[in-house]
Amino acid sequence: MAKRFYKYFPWMFLFGDLSVVGFTLVISHFLVGSFIDIPKMDLSLYGVYLLMWVMVVAFRKDYKVGRATDYFFTLQRLSGSLLWFFAMIAFLWIAFQAYHLSRVFLLVNGTIMAIMLSFYRVAVHISLKQYRAKGGNYRNAVIIGKGGTSFKLARVFQQRKDFGINFIGYYDDTSSCVETRGNLSDFFNEVESMNLNLIYINERLDLPTIKKIIRYADEHYIKVKVIPGGSLQLEKNLSFSKYGDFFVINVNAIPLDHLYNRVIKRAFDIMFSLFVTLFILSWLIPLVGILIRLESKGPVFFVQLRNGENNKEFKCLKFRSMTPNDYADTRQATKNDPRVTRIGSFLRNSSLDEMPQFLNVLKGDMSIVGPRPHTVPMNETFKNQIERYNGRHKIKPGITGLAQVKGYRGEIIRSYQIRSRVRLDHFYIHNWNLWMDLKIVFQTIRELIINRENAY
């Protein structure tokens, strides 16, 4: 059953993908054709379009849906494939000077593809989990070496049937229980009859035994995985680095350590902030600048040193919302703060005072989404009071962030507020993906419209 599944599933997946993309072409042609004149549908051209999508999906192996991966990972892979696909389309569009093709059509089609393929891919992911939970597409696994974290892994297999891993039992020389099938000698005697797919090795086993198991597994095409001990069972994603033939475990790696993820996030930052700068800041800065200067003397922008990536200080821009004072860096704005001007009160209440920070994003000091930066004096105070506080500076600070959309924004009155911010910032840093950024942006817009309680 497993072999048949792996043989046919990629073709089923590709067929479904092609059906969705083909449907998006028809819908896009109908929608765009309702507003502008575009050439009639060229089947050969769209055939090339579909073939290129197949090439991207096959090259990136999108049909491999991991047993333990979540839906965000599936969407992240899709976003990567879409970027590759439209980069190829753009290259061919320029190389062959195919300017007769409508850019509006490509934009509309790209949007519809992203939406419909997202639903399709998540639906496939959910269906696979349900199929595996009911006993389909399972893989047989044993654990060699009981004790330590082996017991926890066995419980995971028994509780999460959607992983599709059929736990057969333990093999151990010193420990026995209901689930222990025998010692190591019994394992080598019985392994051929078990149709085994996975072997999990307890890291406490001695090196000669581990090498013997790996040699046997290599000869019989069985995957081997080592169970890290309790000291490595952290709330982090482990990764590995290779120095020649020697491997080390990276225990505090984050998604944005990878170049691909950094490029994706930076591209999103540039496109978003460039759009805001050209279509909003271009007229907002002169307008707000005039209003600020009419009410009080002083600069239009309030420039403040804040801590950024790797704790490096940068000049954070805001519209000036207060009368010039000596306490801007050390005293937080409070409700009915007498320092706040009338136009400043409006700017702060609407969060428009933060808009110049899109220029910080373009410059590269900030990101659209990330931990909110604090003033340098506040940073010095909090890092001595809050555990793991400095870890929030692993990445660029953001105009908005996960903590802000979860309600932790504005004045910090009680210690739990900053602790909650730090906890959510750490979650964001260690679980970042593009879809999380998009979700936070939409939630921020929603918060700006309906929830102004802590904006002052």
Image: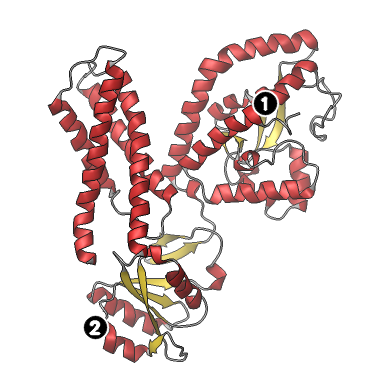
Does 217 appear above or below 380? below
Using the rendered view, name the quadrant where residue 145 is placed: bottom left
Q: Residue visible at 33% across and 91% down?
A: 185
In this orientation, which residue lies closer to the viewer: 203 or 133?
133
- Determine the residue positioned at 56% across, 17% down: 280
| Left or right: where 414 falls relative to 397 | right
Graded by Cα atoms within 10 Å as few (under 14), some (14 to 19) or many (20 or more), the crowding at tag 1 reads some
Where's the C terminus, which quadrant? top right
In front of the other: 181 or 240:
181
Image point 47% across, 77% down: which residue? 150
Query: Which of the image's four quarters has the N terminus?
Result: bottom left
Task: Write down the residue under mark 1.
Answer: 351
Q: Is residue 404 above or below residue 320?
A: below
Rounded to the nearest whole Å, what is the CA distance between mark 2 and mark 1? 67 Å
Q: Secondary structure at mark 2?
A: helix
Disc marking residue 193? 2
Graded by Cα atoms within 10 Å as few (under 14), some (14 to 19) or many (20 or more), the crowding at tag 2 reads few
In this rendering, position of residue 350 left or right of residue 42: right
Amino acid identity at mark 1? Ser
Measured as percent of width and height from the top left, residue 52 is found at 21, 36
Query: Left or right of 345: which side holds 196?
Result: left
- Secondary structure beneath label 1: loop
